[in-house]
Amino acid sequence: MPTPKFNKFKQYFNRQKPSIQEIVREPTAGGIVYRRDKNNQVEILLIQDAKDRWTIPKGHIEEGETAQQTAKREIGEEAGLKKVEVLGWLGKIHFRYRRVDKLVLMTTQIYLVKALGDTNAIKKEDWMNDIRWFSFHDALDEIEYEDIGKLMLLAMKKIRQENL
């Protein structure tokens, strides 16, 4: 039996990542955007990123902007929905990931947001693969991030309890 050629495969296992040189904090904000369909059922807006992950509209907080202002701006930019009403803060989620030699600590403030006006006039940005309204249960199945899923459950509880 011939000896396996391990040297050919070593190149894949000996890759060294550069050590972390800096920790970067990135505050972001976004919203769980909902509307009611013709049968008065709740629908949730999700966007599909370039890596095919379904998530909510969110983005970086710009200088001089509050988290709530950022959530509204990002929903407008990412979904084309300019007429929205922020109904309340749902919570925050934490992500961390590596960007070459930096450790990025991202904190995202999440708001409950009601879409107003022509909610069918959504449009995706170039970097997105898709944007679409989902029934609440389908959205919960599709959402990529568990922490956002938990806040979606909290959002639905709030919508029901407060008859929003």
Image: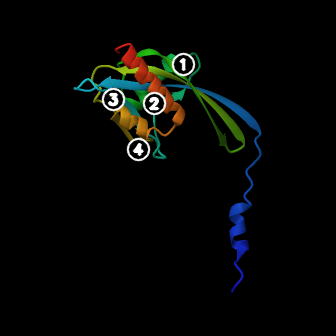
Which residue occupies the foreground of this view, 112 or 146? 146
Residue assigned mark 1: 67
Residue flagged by tag 3: what amino acid is it? Glu
Indicate the secondary structure of the residue bearing disc 1: helix
Comparing marks 1 and 3, which lies closer to the viewer?
3
Residue farthest to the left, as pictured: 38
Identify the residue at horizontal 38%, vertical 41% (top origin).
130
Pick whichever of labels 1 and 2 is earlier in the sequence: 2
Residue flagged by tag 1: what amino acid is it? Ala
In the rendered image, which quarter is residue 3 located in?
bottom right
Residue assigned mark 2: 57
Residue assigned mark 3: 43
Q: Position of residue 65 (x, y in %)?
A: 55, 17
Pick whichever of labels 4 and 2 is earlier in the sequence: 2
Pick whichever of labels 1 and 3 is earlier in the sequence: 3
Pick whichever of labels 4 and 3 is earlier in the sequence: 3
Say whether marks 1 and 4 touch (CB < 8 Å): no
Category of crowding for the residue at label 4, using alpha-carbon neighbours closer than 10 angstroms: few (below 14), some (14–19), many (at least 20) = some
- Kindly identify which numbered label has been placed on residue 129: 4
Category of crowding for the residue at label 1, using alpha-carbon neighbours closer than 10 angstroms: few (below 14), some (14–19), many (at least 20) = many
Q: Is residue 23 left or right of residue 61?
A: right
For the rendered model, the colour scheme is rainbow
Comparing marks 4 and 3, which lies closer to the viewer?
3
Q: Cα distance, mark 3 to mark 2?
A: 15 Å
